[in-house]
Amino acid sequence: MQNTTRIIANPLAAGLAPGEATTDRIAWVKLSLVFLPLAAPISDAKVLTGRQKPLTEIAFLFAEIETEQGHSGIGYSYSKRAGGPGQFAHAKEIAGELIGEDPNDIARIWDKLVWAGASVGRSGLSTQAIAAFDIALWDLKAKRAKLPLAKLLGAHRDSVRCYNTSGGYLSMPIEEVKERVSMALEKGIGAIKLKVGQPDPMVDLARIEAVRKHIGDVPLAIDANQQWDRTTALRFGRIAEQFSLTWIEEPLDAYDYEGHAALAKELATPIATGEMLTSVDEHYELIRHNSVDFIQPDAPRVGGITPFLKILALADHKKLQLAPHYCMEIHLHLTAAYGREPWVEHFEWSEAMFNEKLHVVNGRMIVPNRPGLGFSLSDQARAWTRATHEAGKRP
Protein backbone atom coordinates (compact mmCIF):
# COMPACT_ATOMS: atom_id res chain seq x y z
CA MET A 1 0.00 0.00 0.00
CA GLN A 2 1.42 3.33 -1.04
CA ASN A 3 1.91 5.91 1.71
CA THR A 4 0.82 9.42 0.83
CA THR A 5 1.13 12.59 2.83
CA ARG A 6 -1.46 15.29 2.51
CA ILE A 7 -0.09 18.81 2.89
CA ILE A 8 -2.62 21.32 4.14
CA ALA A 9 -1.84 24.95 3.45
CA ASN A 10 -1.79 27.24 6.44
CA PRO A 11 -4.84 29.52 6.10
CA LEU A 12 -3.07 32.22 8.11
CA ALA A 13 -0.52 32.67 5.32
CA ALA A 14 -2.91 34.84 3.34
CA GLY A 15 -5.30 35.80 6.15
CA LEU A 16 -8.43 33.99 7.24
CA ALA A 17 -11.55 34.29 5.13
CA PRO A 18 -13.72 37.19 6.35
CA GLY A 19 -16.16 36.19 9.10
CA GLU A 20 -19.02 37.89 10.85
CA ALA A 21 -16.61 40.36 12.50
CA THR A 22 -15.91 41.95 9.11
CA THR A 23 -18.45 44.76 8.75
CA ASP A 24 -16.74 47.15 6.33
CA ARG A 25 -14.44 47.01 3.33
CA ILE A 26 -12.06 49.37 1.56
CA ALA A 27 -13.72 50.64 -1.59
CA TRP A 28 -11.46 53.40 -2.93
CA VAL A 29 -7.83 54.53 -2.70
CA LYS A 30 -6.34 57.70 -4.14
CA LEU A 31 -2.62 58.44 -4.37
CA SER A 32 -1.14 61.90 -4.87
CA LEU A 33 2.47 62.86 -5.52
CA VAL A 34 2.96 66.38 -4.17
CA PHE A 35 6.15 68.47 -4.27
CA LEU A 36 6.56 71.05 -1.51
CA PRO A 37 8.96 73.84 -2.58
CA LEU A 38 11.22 75.36 0.07
CA ALA A 39 11.61 79.13 0.29
CA ALA A 40 15.39 78.85 -0.12
CA PRO A 41 17.87 75.97 -0.65
CA ILE A 42 19.24 74.55 2.59
CA SER A 43 22.42 72.63 3.34
CA ASP A 44 23.61 70.35 6.10
CA ALA A 45 26.88 68.45 6.50
CA LYS A 46 26.02 66.00 3.70
CA VAL A 47 26.11 68.90 1.26
CA LEU A 48 29.42 70.21 2.56
CA THR A 49 31.01 66.78 2.11
CA GLY A 50 29.74 66.65 -1.49
CA ARG A 51 27.46 63.67 -0.91
CA GLN A 52 24.24 65.52 -1.60
CA LYS A 53 22.97 68.67 -3.26
CA PRO A 54 21.20 71.44 -1.33
CA LEU A 55 17.59 70.63 -0.52
CA THR A 56 15.09 72.65 -2.58
CA GLU A 57 11.86 70.63 -2.34
CA ILE A 58 10.28 67.68 -0.56
CA ALA A 59 8.21 65.01 -2.29
CA PHE A 60 5.12 63.78 -0.44
CA LEU A 61 3.15 60.64 -1.23
CA PHE A 62 -0.40 60.97 0.09
CA ALA A 63 -2.85 58.09 0.34
CA GLU A 64 -6.57 58.74 0.81
CA ILE A 65 -8.75 55.74 1.66
CA GLU A 66 -12.53 55.40 1.82
CA THR A 67 -14.68 52.43 2.82
CA GLU A 68 -18.07 51.13 1.76
CA GLN A 69 -19.58 52.55 4.95
CA GLY A 70 -18.16 56.00 4.23
CA HIS A 71 -15.24 56.05 6.67
CA SER A 72 -12.07 57.76 5.44
CA GLY A 73 -8.43 58.22 6.33
CA ILE A 74 -5.37 60.02 5.01
CA GLY A 75 -1.68 59.24 5.42
CA TYR A 76 1.59 60.26 3.88
CA SER A 77 5.17 59.31 3.24
CA TYR A 78 7.88 61.57 1.86
CA SER A 79 11.35 61.77 0.35
CA LYS A 80 14.03 64.42 0.13
CA ARG A 81 16.13 65.03 -3.00
CA ALA A 82 15.23 61.73 -4.68
CA GLY A 83 12.84 58.81 -4.37
CA GLY A 84 9.45 60.50 -4.34
CA PRO A 85 8.42 59.36 -7.85
CA GLY A 86 9.71 55.88 -6.98
CA GLN A 87 7.52 55.70 -3.90
CA PHE A 88 4.53 56.82 -5.97
CA ALA A 89 5.25 54.20 -8.64
CA HIS A 90 5.47 51.37 -6.11
CA ALA A 91 2.36 52.52 -4.25
CA LYS A 92 0.52 52.67 -7.59
CA GLU A 93 1.48 49.04 -8.32
CA ILE A 94 0.12 47.69 -5.03
CA ALA A 95 -2.81 50.05 -4.32
CA GLY A 96 -5.31 47.60 -5.76
CA GLU A 97 -4.38 45.06 -3.08
CA LEU A 98 -6.33 47.14 -0.54
CA ILE A 99 -9.66 47.02 -2.35
CA GLY A 100 -12.12 44.73 -0.58
CA GLU A 101 -10.01 44.44 2.59
CA ASP A 102 -11.41 45.10 6.05
CA PRO A 103 -9.80 48.44 7.05
CA ASN A 104 -9.55 47.19 10.64
CA ASP A 105 -7.06 44.46 9.69
CA ILE A 106 -4.18 46.91 9.63
CA ALA A 107 -1.38 44.55 10.63
CA ARG A 108 -2.46 41.87 8.14
CA ILE A 109 -2.82 44.46 5.37
CA TRP A 110 0.71 45.68 6.08
CA ASP A 111 2.02 42.13 5.69
CA LYS A 112 0.00 41.65 2.49
CA LEU A 113 1.39 44.84 0.95
CA VAL A 114 5.00 44.14 1.89
CA TRP A 115 4.83 40.65 0.41
CA ALA A 116 3.17 42.00 -2.73
CA GLY A 117 6.42 43.81 -3.48
CA ALA A 118 8.87 41.64 -1.57
CA SER A 119 11.13 41.13 -4.58
CA VAL A 120 12.32 44.74 -4.17
CA GLY A 121 12.85 44.26 -0.45
CA ARG A 122 11.01 44.55 2.84
CA SER A 123 12.59 47.86 3.84
CA GLY A 124 13.57 51.08 2.13
CA LEU A 125 11.54 52.56 -0.70
CA SER A 126 9.03 49.72 -0.81
CA THR A 127 7.97 50.03 2.82
CA GLN A 128 8.08 53.83 2.65
CA ALA A 129 5.39 53.55 -0.04
CA ILE A 130 3.40 51.21 2.20
CA ALA A 131 3.66 53.74 5.03
CA ALA A 132 1.22 56.11 3.35
CA PHE A 133 -1.44 53.37 3.29
CA ASP A 134 -0.72 52.19 6.82
CA ILE A 135 -0.88 55.69 8.29
CA ALA A 136 -4.13 56.36 6.44
CA LEU A 137 -5.66 53.19 7.94
CA TRP A 138 -4.70 54.26 11.47
CA ASP A 139 -6.16 57.70 10.78
CA LEU A 140 -9.36 56.05 9.56
CA LYS A 141 -9.55 53.83 12.62
CA ALA A 142 -9.22 56.75 15.01
CA LYS A 143 -11.72 58.85 13.06
CA ARG A 144 -14.22 56.01 13.17
CA ALA A 145 -13.76 55.90 16.96
CA LYS A 146 -14.11 59.73 17.03
CA LEU A 147 -10.81 60.00 18.90
CA PRO A 148 -7.48 61.72 18.28
CA LEU A 149 -5.02 58.99 17.31
CA ALA A 150 -3.02 59.59 20.50
CA LYS A 151 -6.10 58.76 22.57
CA LEU A 152 -6.87 55.67 20.52
CA LEU A 153 -3.33 54.40 21.14
CA GLY A 154 -3.53 55.20 24.86
CA ALA A 155 -2.02 58.60 25.55
CA HIS A 156 0.35 59.34 28.40
CA ARG A 157 0.04 63.10 27.85
CA ASP A 158 -1.92 65.72 25.93
CA SER A 159 1.15 67.72 24.88
CA VAL A 160 4.76 66.92 23.97
CA ARG A 161 7.99 68.86 24.34
CA CYS A 162 9.06 70.23 20.97
CA TYR A 163 12.26 71.54 19.43
CA ASN A 164 12.90 73.42 16.19
CA THR A 165 15.44 72.41 13.53
CA SER A 166 14.54 74.43 10.44
CA GLY A 167 16.40 77.54 11.62
CA GLY A 168 19.76 75.91 12.29
CA TYR A 169 21.10 74.82 8.90
CA LEU A 170 24.72 75.27 7.83
CA SER A 171 23.67 77.30 4.78
CA MET A 172 22.59 80.07 7.14
CA PRO A 173 25.10 82.56 8.57
CA ILE A 174 25.19 82.62 12.35
CA GLU A 175 23.33 85.93 12.61
CA GLU A 176 20.44 84.48 10.60
CA VAL A 177 20.50 81.37 12.79
CA LYS A 178 20.20 83.49 15.94
CA GLU A 179 17.36 85.48 14.40
CA ARG A 180 15.46 82.31 13.49
CA VAL A 181 16.15 80.82 16.91
CA SER A 182 14.63 83.89 18.53
CA MET A 183 11.55 83.61 16.31
CA ALA A 184 11.11 79.94 17.25
CA LEU A 185 11.37 80.64 20.97
CA GLU A 186 8.90 83.51 20.65
CA LYS A 187 6.42 81.04 19.13
CA GLY A 188 6.69 78.97 22.31
CA ILE A 189 9.00 76.24 21.02
CA GLY A 190 10.97 74.73 23.87
CA ALA A 191 14.36 73.76 22.41
CA ILE A 192 16.68 74.26 19.45
CA LYS A 193 18.68 71.88 17.26
CA LEU A 194 21.72 73.20 15.40
CA LYS A 195 23.35 71.55 12.39
CA VAL A 196 27.09 70.85 12.61
CA GLY A 197 29.67 69.06 10.45
CA GLN A 198 31.70 71.91 8.97
CA PRO A 199 35.03 70.92 7.37
CA ASP A 200 36.66 72.90 10.20
CA PRO A 201 35.24 71.69 13.53
CA MET A 202 36.29 74.95 15.15
CA VAL A 203 33.64 76.74 13.06
CA ASP A 204 31.03 74.38 14.51
CA LEU A 205 32.22 75.04 18.03
CA ALA A 206 32.03 78.79 17.47
CA ARG A 207 28.45 78.47 16.16
CA ILE A 208 27.41 76.31 19.10
CA GLU A 209 28.95 78.76 21.55
CA ALA A 210 27.17 81.69 19.86
CA VAL A 211 23.79 79.97 20.00
CA ARG A 212 24.30 78.81 23.58
CA LYS A 213 25.05 82.37 24.66
CA HIS A 214 22.06 83.60 22.68
CA ILE A 215 19.50 81.23 24.23
CA GLY A 216 20.90 80.78 27.72
CA ASP A 217 19.66 77.62 29.44
CA VAL A 218 17.18 76.64 26.72
CA PRO A 219 17.81 72.99 25.71
CA LEU A 220 20.18 72.74 22.73
CA ALA A 221 21.00 69.72 20.55
CA ILE A 222 23.35 69.33 17.58
CA ASP A 223 23.14 67.17 14.44
CA ALA A 224 26.16 66.06 12.34
CA ASN A 225 24.07 64.16 9.74
CA GLN A 226 26.40 61.12 9.77
CA GLN A 227 29.43 63.02 8.47
CA TRP A 228 32.04 62.44 11.22
CA ASP A 229 34.37 59.50 11.63
CA ARG A 230 34.75 57.86 15.04
CA THR A 231 37.82 59.87 16.07
CA THR A 232 36.33 63.23 15.12
CA ALA A 233 33.04 62.41 16.84
CA LEU A 234 34.76 61.41 20.07
CA ARG A 235 37.07 64.43 20.17
CA PHE A 236 34.30 66.85 19.25
CA GLY A 237 31.92 65.28 21.72
CA ARG A 238 34.35 65.69 24.58
CA ILE A 239 34.98 69.35 23.77
CA ALA A 240 31.24 70.00 23.34
CA GLU A 241 30.36 68.67 26.79
CA GLN A 242 30.90 72.19 28.14
CA PHE A 243 27.72 73.31 26.33
CA SER A 244 25.40 70.89 28.19
CA LEU A 245 23.84 69.60 24.98
CA THR A 246 20.61 67.63 25.13
CA TRP A 247 22.03 65.21 22.55
CA ILE A 248 24.48 64.76 19.68
CA GLU A 249 22.55 63.45 16.68
CA GLU A 250 23.90 61.17 13.95
CA PRO A 251 27.58 61.68 14.70
CA LEU A 252 28.44 58.58 12.64
CA ASP A 253 27.10 56.57 9.72
CA ALA A 254 23.56 55.41 10.45
CA TYR A 255 24.60 51.74 10.30
CA ASP A 256 27.65 52.06 12.54
CA TYR A 257 25.96 50.46 15.53
CA GLU A 258 29.22 49.65 17.28
CA GLY A 259 30.67 53.13 16.76
CA HIS A 260 27.58 54.79 18.20
CA ALA A 261 27.69 52.39 21.12
CA ALA A 262 31.31 53.36 21.86
CA LEU A 263 30.38 57.06 21.81
CA ALA A 264 27.37 56.50 24.04
CA LYS A 265 29.63 54.77 26.54
CA GLU A 266 32.41 57.38 26.46
CA LEU A 267 30.52 60.69 26.33
CA ALA A 268 28.45 62.41 28.96
CA THR A 269 26.27 63.92 26.22
CA PRO A 270 23.49 61.55 25.09
CA ILE A 271 23.68 60.05 21.59
CA ALA A 272 20.68 60.19 19.23
CA THR A 273 20.21 58.42 15.90
CA GLY A 274 17.83 56.21 13.91
CA GLU A 275 16.09 58.56 11.48
CA MET A 276 17.70 57.06 8.37
CA LEU A 277 16.85 53.46 9.23
CA THR A 278 13.97 51.89 7.34
CA SER A 279 12.88 48.82 9.31
CA VAL A 280 12.17 47.46 12.76
CA ASP A 281 15.14 45.10 12.44
CA GLU A 282 17.58 47.96 11.85
CA HIS A 283 16.30 49.79 14.93
CA TYR A 284 16.59 46.57 16.89
CA GLU A 285 20.29 46.52 16.07
CA LEU A 286 20.67 50.03 17.49
CA ILE A 287 18.91 48.94 20.64
CA ARG A 288 20.73 45.62 20.93
CA HIS A 289 24.14 47.29 20.62
CA ASN A 290 23.31 49.97 23.22
CA SER A 291 23.98 52.53 20.48
CA VAL A 292 21.58 55.28 21.53
CA ASP A 293 20.20 57.22 24.45
CA PHE A 294 17.56 58.90 22.24
CA ILE A 295 16.10 56.72 19.51
CA GLN A 296 14.77 58.61 16.47
CA PRO A 297 12.54 56.44 14.28
CA ASP A 298 10.63 58.05 11.43
CA ALA A 299 7.18 56.50 10.88
CA PRO A 300 7.03 57.06 7.10
CA ARG A 301 10.57 55.73 6.67
CA VAL A 302 10.06 52.53 8.67
CA GLY A 303 6.81 51.63 6.89
CA GLY A 304 4.15 53.40 8.91
CA ILE A 305 2.61 53.38 12.36
CA THR A 306 2.34 49.59 12.57
CA PRO A 307 6.14 48.99 12.55
CA PHE A 308 6.74 52.24 14.48
CA LEU A 309 4.75 50.86 17.42
CA LYS A 310 6.93 47.75 17.43
CA ILE A 311 10.01 49.98 17.68
CA LEU A 312 8.42 51.87 20.58
CA ALA A 313 7.86 48.62 22.44
CA LEU A 314 11.52 47.64 21.98
CA ALA A 315 12.71 51.11 23.01
CA ASP A 316 10.51 51.21 26.08
CA HIS A 317 11.78 47.81 27.19
CA LYS A 318 15.33 49.22 27.05
CA LYS A 319 14.20 52.43 28.80
CA LEU A 320 15.32 54.65 25.91
CA GLN A 321 14.35 58.27 25.33
CA LEU A 322 12.36 59.06 22.18
CA ALA A 323 12.73 61.90 19.65
CA PRO A 324 11.28 60.93 16.24
CA HIS A 325 12.47 62.59 13.06
CA TYR A 326 10.35 65.15 11.14
CA CYS A 327 6.60 64.55 10.41
CA MET A 328 5.23 66.39 13.44
CA GLU A 329 1.63 65.87 12.26
CA ILE A 330 2.10 62.11 12.75
CA HIS A 331 4.75 61.91 15.45
CA LEU A 332 2.89 64.20 17.85
CA HIS A 333 0.31 61.44 18.37
CA LEU A 334 2.87 58.64 18.59
CA THR A 335 5.11 60.44 21.08
CA ALA A 336 2.08 61.32 23.21
CA ALA A 337 1.52 57.57 23.59
CA TYR A 338 5.10 56.77 24.74
CA GLY A 339 5.65 56.10 28.40
CA ARG A 340 8.76 58.25 28.80
CA GLU A 341 8.75 62.02 28.28
CA PRO A 342 9.68 62.45 24.58
CA TRP A 343 10.47 65.22 22.13
CA VAL A 344 8.80 65.99 18.79
CA GLU A 345 10.57 67.87 15.99
CA HIS A 346 9.00 71.12 14.79
CA PHE A 347 9.27 72.19 11.14
CA GLU A 348 7.09 74.95 9.78
CA TRP A 349 7.83 73.83 6.19
CA SER A 350 4.80 71.60 5.83
CA GLU A 351 2.21 73.96 7.35
CA ALA A 352 1.00 75.16 3.92
CA MET A 353 0.11 71.56 3.01
CA PHE A 354 -2.72 71.26 5.54
CA ASN A 355 -5.88 73.13 6.43
CA GLU A 356 -5.30 72.65 10.16
CA LYS A 357 -2.46 74.02 12.31
CA LEU A 358 -0.64 72.57 15.29
CA HIS A 359 -0.24 74.81 18.31
CA VAL A 360 2.75 75.21 20.61
CA VAL A 361 2.43 76.61 24.13
CA ASN A 362 5.20 76.95 26.72
CA GLY A 363 7.58 74.67 24.88
CA ARG A 364 5.04 71.94 24.20
CA MET A 365 3.10 70.92 21.09
CA ILE A 366 -0.58 70.37 21.87
CA VAL A 367 -2.36 67.20 20.76
CA PRO A 368 -5.35 68.54 18.78
CA ASN A 369 -8.91 67.66 19.75
CA ARG A 370 -9.69 66.40 16.26
CA PRO A 371 -10.42 62.79 15.27
CA GLY A 372 -7.58 60.77 13.78
CA LEU A 373 -4.37 62.56 12.92
CA GLY A 374 -6.38 65.74 12.62
CA PHE A 375 -5.27 67.08 9.25
CA SER A 376 -6.65 67.42 5.73
CA LEU A 377 -4.99 68.48 2.48
CA SER A 378 -5.14 72.17 1.62
CA ASP A 379 -5.93 73.70 -1.76
CA GLN A 380 -2.25 74.62 -1.96
CA ALA A 381 -1.24 70.98 -1.62
CA ARG A 382 -3.69 70.08 -4.38
CA ALA A 383 -2.09 72.77 -6.55
CA TRP A 384 1.38 71.32 -5.94
CA THR A 385 0.22 67.83 -7.01
CA ARG A 386 2.08 66.42 -10.02
CA ALA A 387 0.50 62.98 -10.36
CA THR A 388 -2.48 61.02 -9.04
CA HIS A 389 -3.75 57.45 -9.22
CA GLU A 390 -7.01 55.84 -8.09
CA ALA A 391 -7.93 52.24 -7.34
CA GLY A 392 -11.44 50.94 -6.77
CA LYS A 393 -14.59 53.03 -6.90
CA ARG A 394 -15.45 55.88 -4.57
CA PRO A 395 -18.62 55.03 -2.59
Image (cartoon, grey):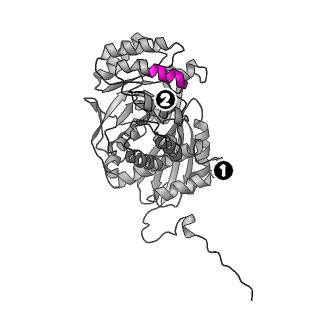
Residue that carries the numbered disc 1 in the rendered image: 119
Is 128 rendered above or below residue 7? Answer: above
Q: Secondary structure at mark 1?
A: helix
* Sooner in the amino-acid sequence: mark 1 or mark 2: 1
Question: Which three-letter amino acid code belongs to the residue tagged 1?
Answer: Ser
Q: Nearer the viewer, residue 224 or 350?
A: 224
Q: Residue at x 51, y 40 (%)?
A: 301
Q: Are marks 1 and 2 in contact (CB under 8 Å)?
A: no
The question of residue 187 being in magenta is answered with: no
Q: Position of residue 378 (x, y in %)?
A: 42, 36
Q: Position of residue 4 (x, y in %)?
A: 70, 81
Residue that carries the numbered disc 2 in the rendered image: 250
Q: Position of residue 204 (x, y in %)?
A: 46, 15
* Residue lying at the far right of the rendered structure: 2
Q: Residue at x 45, y 52 (%)?
A: 137
Is 138 rendered above or below residue 102? Answer: above
Where are the magenta residues, as a range? 224-237
Question: Seen in the image, is 63 located left or right of residue 181?
Answer: right
Quadrant where the N terminus lies? bottom right
Q: Nearer the viewer, residue 28 or 157?
A: 157
Q: Nearer the viewer, residue 197 or 58?
A: 197
Q: Secondary structure at mark 2?
A: loop
